[in-house]
Amino acid sequence: MTEQLYTVASDSETTGEDKSQMSFPDVAIGIDIGTSNCSVAVWTGHQVELLKNTRNQKGMRSYVMFKDDSLSAGVTGGATREHGHEERDILSGSAIFNMKRLIGRMDTDEVVQASKSLPFLVQTLGIGVRPFIAALVNNMWRSTTPEEVLAIFLLELKALVEMHLKHPVRNAVLTIPVAFSRFQQTRIERACAMAGLHVLRLMPEPTAIALLYAQQQQQLLHDNMGSGIEKIALIFNMGAGYCDAAVAATAGGVSQIRALSGSTVGGEDILQNVMRHLMPDFDSLYAGQTMDRIKSIGLLRMATQDAIHKLATQEHVEINVDLGAGHKVSKILDRGEFEKVNQSIFEKCEGIIKQCLADAKLTPEDINDVILVGGCSRIPKIRSVVLGLCKKDDSYSGIDPLEAAVSGAALEGAIASGVSDPSGSLDLLTIQATPMNLGIRADGGNFAAIIPRNTAVPARRDMLFTTTHDNQTEALIAVYEGEGNQAEDNHLLGYFKITGIPAAAKGTVEINVCMDIDAGNVLRVFAGVVKPQGQAVPPFIEVRMPTLDDGHGWCGQALAKMYGSTLDLATIPKKLHP
Amino acid sequence: MNTAVEVRCAAGGGGGVNAAAFGRRMMRPAPAGHCRVIRAAATSTVASGRGEDDYYKVLSLDRAGEVGAEEIRRAYRRLALRYHPDACPPSRCAESTRLFLQLRRAYETLSDPALRVRYDAELMMRVRRPARPAAEEDASSSSSSLARDVWEAQLRTLRARSDERRRHGAAGTARRGRWFEVGSSAPYSKENGQSRDKPNSIKNL
């Protein structure tokens, strides 16, 4: 009965309007913006096709080159027409890359701190504001933002697609890392909007792969080769910037995501570890972002990258690089040493998979297929770690590790755009799950999860809270996302006040907080007083999250300083459901 | 197949009691239709008052039959393909979201052995005393009998589980969910089957 109060509100016009604006037959394209490489794919009517750029590449380097008055992105190979020089130009300080790692992060974030060793300028103050990012143009640092860089890139990508399809495109499905916060997701949406793209869905990368897997299983069934029995797949995706894992249960074209976990470790960390290993005193040799440093760091980066690629197939590799000004690196790096240097990264990968299996309540024996995707899946140690944990001899072979995510995104684009195939090849579905707990601050500084992680999306859950002081008339709803038990350990998404609570003894008022995630992954929070009832009670409040424009940082502290515990709430144990 | 998409979601756009709208939808012959009974019912007063339907009907399963875990999963997936907002045109987004949430709630309850036992017991109670207000005087006796039923069913489930484990222990086939097919569904669905024909609890649409 109480549910009615907000069920009505949740079917709000905003949802209807958002959706009706989309021109229906327009099929959304699939985009995989990787930290290092990008690709784009479209549903051509009977299959997914990856588009190639003018240089015949399916995977395009993710960067934007800043020159005098022109900007050019990696889609068309803006750095240079000559392929061999591209990498050197990218590392010249004039190009911004790794935007996916920087986007939506504050300067206290360790990922931003680690990005300071990149050739372009990343300046931090360490106080919880946006970092200052700049590219070198005519020996001057010209400022930009990760959103802007991404938007320029997407604009070029959009032009490429329109050239191929010969009609304008508007809607897109993008893949994102599991570890992306909701705040980072809004940044991606903003970048897309700047490029004239409407985001139909943001799909965690492994779930896009799960959709592709569901399609392949259906295909097998059509060819009378599959059994139709539910198959459990563990999907492990590791690219340059992020690492994700998911467990999906697939049958009948439906992939149910049972668990998701992810972390901000990737090839970039491996690269930096090896660079530091090759030249431990780099930072002391080159202080400040001087031209010498930029040049040396570029050379070292290229040599290291090359060595890591070779180590995927070779037991050892010889590195010989002259960094100029008398600094040289010459070393033979073998696989054992490489693995030792990156041990902490492999351990993190292990942790992600273990958590995923535990969340899905599965043992390695329950897994039918292990799907390894992403650039780092070529690293032998990563393969052995993942396969070892899943007790498998080999990984699933039907999926291209570099094209899987974008293909899944294009499939989802077609499905979510309402395209249907007469042969039934689009009767597919990935039922998404929430990657992180969503909840509010309650019981002092604690975090009360209202929608626990790995809840199927769309989701709607509610919880009852009560006041902590006698005659408390106002309460603060501070919405957080994350895994910490303390509210402050999580991302603050936003906050609002419930006012006009009827005066009563503490613990007697009941306040219902309901969280709703719709199919487009939009989070809405509804809150209001449900006991006592009557005319004296204020109406419910609906707030779309996140409301904060700039991550967490200061807001939580400011709120605590201003109000202390006067607006606190406490949890009421939920009545048991049948 | 664009038209088929429209058909899928065409019914019941005007809100109303969501449970009833959902039930009416179930009257359509399912295209994949391998589930046995699609016998939609008007919700009992208790159920509609609480805003939820009979979970078995939400999944278009026949409670009288012995519904196994695999069957529940299959029904859930089949209906998810029809009601998930991704599978419906954007104009039906709000409606399909609501239907999917309902489907999800039903599936979460019935796919969890412990929750299902409790739910089955509660469902029996609803059938036994369908009239809402008369419940006061025998509340204590019925609630204790509910508790006993639940307890017995749980014991039975546990016993079946340990039997199953013992049988499969050596062979090492620790397939999840299997014990529960053996354990909980059979005795309950039989009793439900007997009381199913009471006219005031379930009627045909």
Image (cartoon, coloured by chain):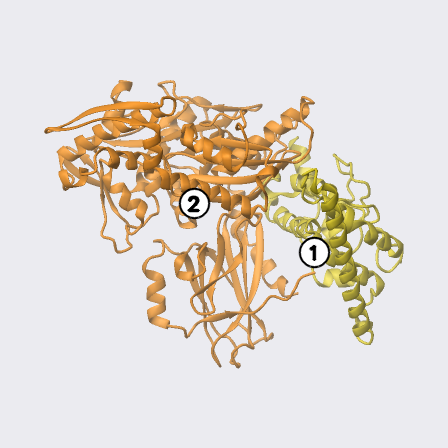
Chain colours: A orange, B yellow
Write down the chain letter for disc 2.
A
Of A122 and B20, the residue lying toward us: A122
Q: Is residue B60 above or below residue A161?
A: below
Q: Position of residue A132 (x, y in %)?
A: 24, 46
Task: Residue at 54%, 76% (x, y): give it.
Answer: A507
Find residue B115 and name its label: 1
Residue A27 visible here: no
Q: Is residue A424 above or below residue B104?
A: above
Q: Is residue A329 above or below residue B93?
A: above
Residue A446 visible here: yes
* Location of residue A193 (image quadrant): top left
A371 vs A574, left or right, is: left
Of B136 and A449, the residue lying toward us: A449
Q: Position of residue B97 (x, y in %)?
A: 61, 48
- Callout 1 environment at 10 Å: few (<14), some (14 to 19), or many (20+)? some
| Quadrant position of the N terminus of chain A in the picture | bottom right
* Location of residue A143 (image quadrant): top left
| Quadrant position of the C terminus of chain A in the picture | bottom right
A158 vs A283, left or right, is: right
A310 vs B77, left or right, is: left
Q: Secondary structure at mark 1?
A: helix
Q: How many marks?
A: 2
Q: Alpha-carbon distance for marks 1 and 2?
A: 32 Å
Three-letter residue code for mark 2? Ala
Find residue A179 and name its label: 2
Q: Secondary structure at mark 2?
A: loop
Find residue A45 and name its label: none
Q: Is label 1 or label 2 in front?
A: 1
Q: Position of residue A199 (x, y in %)?
A: 46, 40
